Image: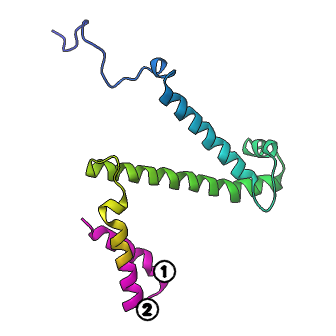
Amino acid sequence: MSVLSETSAPPQWRVDFKTHRGTKAFRVQLLLFIACITASMISLGVGAVSIPLDVIINSLFDLEGPKQTYIIWKSRLPRVLIALMAGASLAVSGVIVQAIVRNPLASPKIMGINSGAALAALGTIMFLPEMPVTYLPWQLLWAASLQR
């Protein structure tokens, strides 16, 4: 006898996108996605050299001259991608904090991370004034990891 019979229900982890397409949450997510893409495209055009949107699109698909392509691919596109990855990593870290403490309103202030990092910064600046400033972020990370 088979483990899965013909009368068994489909797995619960499957999502039917056709039923979720008309929901308000789907529309909000789609609107936010479009806003993120639009802001990214605008960010590619803003700078010391203003580049129009049609040149940006042509440059992304390798259809434009070398000057705009160099500016977009070597300067502005990495900046936009790093900003998107930083925002995504902050969102993931917030979700992890909320999942660990099982509180949807959890923030670093509630857990005391900000206070511990501020205390470590103050102690480092006051008691070790000759310490290079480049070591300060590592000191803050260490102090934040001590909080429980």
Mark 2 or 1: the one toward you: 2
Q: Earlier in the sequence, mark 2 or mark 1?
A: 2
Residue extending farthest to the bottom is: 130
- At horizontal 22% and vertical 9% (from top left) the residue drawn is 5
**Near-viewer residue (29 or 132):** 29
Q: Residue 133 in the image: state x and y as whole percent.
A: 48, 83
Q: Which residue is mark 1?
A: 134
Left or right of 75: which side holds 128?
Answer: left
Disc 2 marks which amino acid?
Answer: Pro
**Near-viewer residue (85 or 65):** 85
Tell me if residue 41 is in the magenta stretch. no
**Magenta residues (range):** 120-148
Q: Which residue is mark 2?
A: 129
Left or right of 31: which side holds 100?
Answer: left
Q: Which mark is residue 85?
A: none
- At horizontal 45% and vertical 18% (from top left) the residue drawn is 19
Instruction: Look at the numbered disc 1 and give the secondary structure of its residue.
Output: helix
- At horizontal 22% and vertical 13% (from top left) the residue drawn is 4
Q: Quadrant of residue 71?
A: bottom right
Q: Residues within 10 Å of mark 2 (few under 14, many from 20)?
A: few
Instruction: Look at the numbered disc 2 and give the secondary structure of its residue.
Output: loop
Tell me if residue 145 is in the magenta stretch. yes
As displayed, is residue 11 above or below residue 31? above
* Viewport quadrant of the N terminus: top left
Q: Main secondary structure of the magenta part?
A: helix
Q: Residue 96 in the image: state x and y as whole percent.
A: 34, 50
Disc 1 marks which amino acid?
Answer: Thr
